[in-house]
């Protein structure tokens, strides 16, 4: 008589076919839920159009993605989850309205990559020849938003952007902290053929040590953008280009070396510009611009209003006043929203002490890209 143990059926391991069947079932459930989400987004878009609310709400979108990151238990990494939900949010936003996002072109510049990281693929990207053209496109209604670099952890401030912020009627509604990983590229990937290396001036500075060590006799040339450098290198085998790996792929270039930036954590901070202010969130920062009289203690008095009101200054930059030699404007990043009582009180006090004060925008504080 067979034993009870012999009667037990040993479970067979799942086959590839059975696992694929389960995967297909899950995929259909995901599709149904995505379409339900899209339907809700469409209804929200209708309500936004009724009351004139901006379709793009950076604080709300950041909140959605951070909630998903907090709930993620793997095996997908935080980076995977962020990319997936950026595209989901982008696609749903596109059902409400397809935003036009301007950036320094051509395609595959770091500005383009930052814009893609923030807005996803479901937007109309508008490549333009200069930072000034990006600002003008938004002001003239040819673009809804613009993405421009303002500082880099290696090379510091981007002076052209700061100068444009002085006079623009636009406001900052967001920031993007984008890791910048440079590659040296050429048409055939042969370093011995490289006679000149092209890139944006900032990128050349970010790779200064690498270039002086590995290509000490090779001439460098600053061009308008990294993508333009890649474009030109694709036409001439004697040219090397410092650009992103994506730009190299787009223009058919081969990699000579990767991650050639002098600082491994090289990051560029980009600003998102628009005509209307962002909605207030729980974790905002405010950027302001002011000037003070040229006298002893004036700057100290101006900055003192923030200390007295318990406001943290996370950054301060000076910029020469173009119309008044040896006098300066000061850009400050402040913790909080301009409508927060403490910050509002501090800004009102600064207005009484400063020759000039302009609040450039309050917006959700950026977070580093997921590792």
Image (spheres, helix red, strand yellow):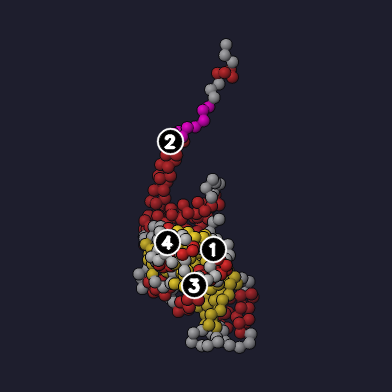
Point 52% across, 77% down: residue? 289
* Res 21 label: 2
Residue 244 vs residue 6, the one in the foreground = 244
Let me know if residue 17 is in the magenta part.
yes
* Res 187 label: 4
Please indicate, yes or no, whether residue 312 appears anywhere in the rendered image: yes
Quarter containing the C terminus: bottom right
Q: CA distance from mark 3 to mark 4?
A: 17 Å
User: For the residues carrying marks 2 and 3, which lies nearer the camera in this image?
Assistant: 3
User: For the residues carrying marks 1 and 2, which lies nearer the camera in this image?
Assistant: 1
How many neighbours does mark 1 have within 10 angstroms: few (below 14), some (14-19), or many (20 or more)? some
Q: Position of residue 349 (x, y in %)?
A: 58, 79
Q: CA distance from mark 1 to mark 4?
A: 18 Å
The stretch of residues the image draws in magenta is: 11-18
Let me know if residue 47 is in the magenta part.
no
For the view shown, which residue lies furthest in the top direction?
1
Quarter containing the N terminus: top right
* Res 260 label: 1
In the rendered structure, which disc, 1 or 4, sits on the residue that comes first in sequence?
A: 4
Q: Which residue is mark 3?
A: 219
In the rendered view, would you say 270 is above or below 8?
below
In the rendered structure, which disc, 2 or 3, sits on the residue that comes first in sequence?
A: 2
* Label 4 secondary element: loop
In the rendered structure, which disc, 4 or 2, sits on the residue that comes first in sequence?
A: 2
């Amino acid at each position: 008589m067979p034993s009870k143990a012999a009667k037990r059926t040993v479970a067979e391991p799942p086959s590839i076919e059975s696992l694929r069947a389960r995967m297909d079932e899950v995929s259909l459930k995901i599709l149904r839920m995505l379409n339900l989400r899209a339907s809700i987004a469409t209804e929200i878009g209708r309500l936004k159009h009724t009351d004139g609310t901006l379709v793009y709400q950076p604080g709300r979108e950041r909140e959605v993605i951070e909630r998903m990151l907090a709930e993620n238990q793997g095996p997908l990494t935080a980076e995977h989850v962020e990319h997936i939900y950026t595209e989901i949010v982008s696609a749903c936003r596109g059902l409400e309205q397809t935003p036009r996002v301007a950036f320094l072109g051509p395609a595959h510049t770091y500005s383009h990559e930052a814009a893609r990281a923030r807005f996803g693929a479901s937007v109309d990207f508008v490549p333009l020849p200069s930072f000034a053209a990006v600002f003008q496109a938004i002001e003239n209604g040819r673009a809804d938003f613009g993405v421009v670099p303002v500082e880099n952890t290696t090379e510091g401030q981007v002076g052209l952007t700061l100068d444009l912020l002085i006079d623009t009627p636009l406001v900052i509604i967001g920031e993007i902290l984008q890791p910048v990983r440079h590659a040296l590229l050429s048409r055939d990937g042969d370093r011995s053929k490289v006679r000149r290396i092209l890139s944006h001036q900032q990128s050349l500075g970010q790779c200064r040590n690498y270039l002086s060590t590995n290509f000490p006799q090779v001439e460098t040339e600053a061009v308008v953008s990294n993508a333009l450098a890649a474009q030109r290198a694709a036409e001439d085998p004697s040219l090397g280009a410092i650009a992103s790996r994506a730009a190299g792929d787009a223009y058919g270039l081969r990699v000579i070396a990767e991650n050639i930036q002098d600082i491994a954590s090289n990051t560029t901070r980009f600003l998102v510009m628009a005509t209307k202010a962002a909605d207030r969130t729980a974790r905002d920062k405010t950027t302001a611009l002011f000037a003070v009289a040229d006298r002893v203690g004036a700057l100290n008095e101006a900055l003192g209003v923030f200390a007295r009101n318990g406001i943290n200054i996370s950054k301060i930059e000076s910029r020469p006043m173009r119309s008044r030699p040896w006098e300066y404007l000061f850009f400050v990043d402040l913790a909080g929203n301009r409508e927060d009582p403490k910050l509002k009180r501090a800004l009102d006090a600064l207005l009484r002490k400063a020759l000039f004060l302009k609040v450039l925008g309050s917006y959700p504080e950026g977070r580093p890209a997921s590792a």
